[in-house]
Each structure stands twice: as C-alpha cells, then as structure tokens.
C-alpha cells in the first residue's frame, strides 16, 4: 500500500550534473510523486505523513540500468556459450513447465534489480517475451516492481549474436521488417538488434565484434521500427559494426568500440535516427571479470580470453572518445552475462570511474538523469524534483565520496512504494570472485 512519506534532515544529490549537494532538506512524497522539496526549516511535514528522520543520510534518484537481460542470474553456465547445451536449455524453457520456471526466474531477477536500488530497468533481449509479461504484471498492479522498458527477443541473423537463444532470426531486409512487426504486435517498448557478434559466440581470435548484419538489413529494421514508434538499440562491438548501425539509423549503440571521425559525426548528427542523434550505452561489467580474473576462475579458453581483451579495450576507448566529443553516454550492466549479477549495477559505475576515468559525479549522472534522457523518460524520472516520480534511494553516506555505498541502500522507493533495509539474495561465488579484482 502506498502512503505519504516525509523525510527530514536529508542531504540531497538531485541527479543534475551541475548541482551541488543540498543539506538539511525535507522531501514530501504523496502517492507516486515527489510533492515538495525544501529546507527542513521551511517545510513542515503535515499530519497524515509517515515521518522519517534521515539523520543526515543521503537521498538521490533511483538508479537506471539501461542494458540487462532478465533470464540469467550471472552464474557462469556452459549453456551461455552456445552449442548443444544451449539448444537443450532453450528447448526446455520453451515447454509449458519451462515457461513457468522462466517467468519465476525473470520475476526474481527483476526484484533483485529493484532491491539493489535500480528503479528503472531496460531489458534488451529475453526469451519468449518473458520480459513483456512481467512488465505488464507490474503496470497492471498485479506485481510490485521497478519501471520496465522491454524489447522482447532481440533480432539477429543466422549465426549472429543471440542466435538460438534470446533472439529471433532475419536474413533479409524484409525478414527484418517482419521481426519488428512481430515484436511490436507483442507490445514491446523498443527494438533490439545484434549488428555484430560477441565474445561468447566467437570461434576465432579477432572474430568477436565481427559484422553480421548488412547495411540494408539495419536500414530496413530501423525504418520499420521508427514508423511504428519504437527506438532501436544495437549490439555493436567493433568499429565497422558501430558504423553500420549508425548509418542504418539506430538510436543507441550498446557496448561500443573505437570511433573514427565519421562515427563521431554520426553520433552527433544522425538524420536516420528517430531523434536526429544517437547515444552510447557502455557495458563494461561483463568484460572486466573475464579480463582481470585468472582462467582457473573464469574457465575461459585462449580464444575467449583474447577476444574479451579486444572488446574491453575497444569499449573503454570508445567511451573515452564519446565523453571527449560531447556524445550522450549512458550505462548498463549486461546482467545475465557470466559474473554480472542482477544486483550489481553499482559496479558498472565503479568500473566507469576506474577504466574510463570519469568523475564519480559523472558516473552517477549517467546512471540517473543521463540514462533517463537517453530512454526518453527524463520528464518522469532521473532526478529528485517536485512533480517527478518518487524513485528515490536513501543511503547511509555520500556516494560521491564512496561509490560503494550504492551497493547497500538503506531504503529504496519505487514510484512511491518504499522498501526499508532491502535484503538481497546474493550469489557468493560471483561476489567472492569479483572482489579479487583490485580497483
């Protein structure tokens, strides 16, 4: 049940990049919205509100994770790498009983995102429209959960990234249009395409990020999606893949690689995209553990290790170029990949600070208002402002000074629903492995 909340003696980080911390503040939450913000001396909490003395704790916007897959927990699995194990698992999940199990797993993973402080999740490739189903349950009030923006199954080509698992296949421009129409019929929020290969499906060193979709296929998919009111997100992990995706009119590049002058110009001015420009979503989280941890832990062979290094270095360089050239940058975790748990969005911020070299303020902005702008929901969420959704985190200290405070929020509020001292079911094997990485 929603109630009215009054928080006094707060320190507010409002999510705007140019704002400073506001001390000794009061916030009134009425239903799903932030009703009033002011100094604790000026604003009295009316009767009928549940009063919390924050005792100088810090309030900031709920995090936005702009790139997840909801089908996996992050535990390394043989089936993720393709082959017969993957085919058998996908076939099993497609049965009547398998779909029930899948829906339960997806629901559990959605709640892990929320309990970790993520109040908006963009899912970019899941099996059997399981993401659409849980979004609809949340929106109808049958289930409490974060705001979900979902793509349903991604669109790939034969042998492309996601082939045989979380993607449907098109091998011509008209098949691409048909896939878009199918997903829109199933009421997705956006279209996800796999323009290049990835680390998990590469069979040779240097093959990860190999261009898979043709320019004509990307153009057709983007044209159809934009006509039907959907943004297009593109998995692209090589320079040529990014170029092909941008020339086709995609709205966001997921992951990224090294840019050249043409690519930078296309990000800034892209007449084929729905907004006239394109944005970058960084996802460093999957590549860092596979790069930094010993093969005895990751179980990677030499091909995968070398490909992971190539992809990670390309993503980091592309992100640096994006910041240097005024390209709009957001972030996601690629949760479900090995060693990327659904509750570890905060780690992506930490990685961006270390590997890309941005200030902590910038990383927090990317995960709040920056992502909100990229996803087109900046009027609804992303900052602590009167009239916006009550998507709020209460933290025990200042995350600008210690970003790891984001790993255990004192309270999470999602559209006015409060969870005090959220308890996460964590995966010890993942946490123990990642904590071996020296940052």
Image (spheres, rainbow, N blue to C red):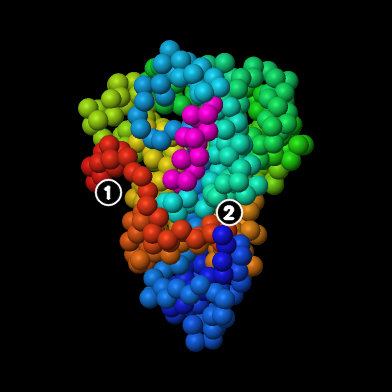
Q: Nearer the viewer, mark 1 or mark 2?
A: 2
Residue in view at x 62 percent, y 49 percent: 141
In the rendered structure, find residue 372 and report the number of the disc placed on it.
2
Residue 204, given in percent of the width and then of the height, sits at 39, 17
Looking at the picture, tell me which residue is in the foreground, 438 or 184: 184
Q: Is residue 385 visible?
A: no
Residue in view at x 61 percent, y 72 percent: 35
Q: Viewed as shown, does residue 234 lie left or right of 182?
A: left
* Helix, strand or loop under label 2: helix
Asked which quadrant contains residue 420, the reply is bottom left
Quote the CA–CA distance across marks 1 and 2. 28 Å
Task: Tell which circle, 1 or 2, labels the residue nearer the N-terminal end.
Answer: 2
Q: Is residue 188 magenta?
A: no
Disc 1 residue crowd, few under 14, some 14–19, many 20+, Cα 10 Å: few
Residue reaching furthest to the bottom? 41
Residue 284, given in percent of the width and then of the height, sits at 41, 41
């Amino acid at each position: 049940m929603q109630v009215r909340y009054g928080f006094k003696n707060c320190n507010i980080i409002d999510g705007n990049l140019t704002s400073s911390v506001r001390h000794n503040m009061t916030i009134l939450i009425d239903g799903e919205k932030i009703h009033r913000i002011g100094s604790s001396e000026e604003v009295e909490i009316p009767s009928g509100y549940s009063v919390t003395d924050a005792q100088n704790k810090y309030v900031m916007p709920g995090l936005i994770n702009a790139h997840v897959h909801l089908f996996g927990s992050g535990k390394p699995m043989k089936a993720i790498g393709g082959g017969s194990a993957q085919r058998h698992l996908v076939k099993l999940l497609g049965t009547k009983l398998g779909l029930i199990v899948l829906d339960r797993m997806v629901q559990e993973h959605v709640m892990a995102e929320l309990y970790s402080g993520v109040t908006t999740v963009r899912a970019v490739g899941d099996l059997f429209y399981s993401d659409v189903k849980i979004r609809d349950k949340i929106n109808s009030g049958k289930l409490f959960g974060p705001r979900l923006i979902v793509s349903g199954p991604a669109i790939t080509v034969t042998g492309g990234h996601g082939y045989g698992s979380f993607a449907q296949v098109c091998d011509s421009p008209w098949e691409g249009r048909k896939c878009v129409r199918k997903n829109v019929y199933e009421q997705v929020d956006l279209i996800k395409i796999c323009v290049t290969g990835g680390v998990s499906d590469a069979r040779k060193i240097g093959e990860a990020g190999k261009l898979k979709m043709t320019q004509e296929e990307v153009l057709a998919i983007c044209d159809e999606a934009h006509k039907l009111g959907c943004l297009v997100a593109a998995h692209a992990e090589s320079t040529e893949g990014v170029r092909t995706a941008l020339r086709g009119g995609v709205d966001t590049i997921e992951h990224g690689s090294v840019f050249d002058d043409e690519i930078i110009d296309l990000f800034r001015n892209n007449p084929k995209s729905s907004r006239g420009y394109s944005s970058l979503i960084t996802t460093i989280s999957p590549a860092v553990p596979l790069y930094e941890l010993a093969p005895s832990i990751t179980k990677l062979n030499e091909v995968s290790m070398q490909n992971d290094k190539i992809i990670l270095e390309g993503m980091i360089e592309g992100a640096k170029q994006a910041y240097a050239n005024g390209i709009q940058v957001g972030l996601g975790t690629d949760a479900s990949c090995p060693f990327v748990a659904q509750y570890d969005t905060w780690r992506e911020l930490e990685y961006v600070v270390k590997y890309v070299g941005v200030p902590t303020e910038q990383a927090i902005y990317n995960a709040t208002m920056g992502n909100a702008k990229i996803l087109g929901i900046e009027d609804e969420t992303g900052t602590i402002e009167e009239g916006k959704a009550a998507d709020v985190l209460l933290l025990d200290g200042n995350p600008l000074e210690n970003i790891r405070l984001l790993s255990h929020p004192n309270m999470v509020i999602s559209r006015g629903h409060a969870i005090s001292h959220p308890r996460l079911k964590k995966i010890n094997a993942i946490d123990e492995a990642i904590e071996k990485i020296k940052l």
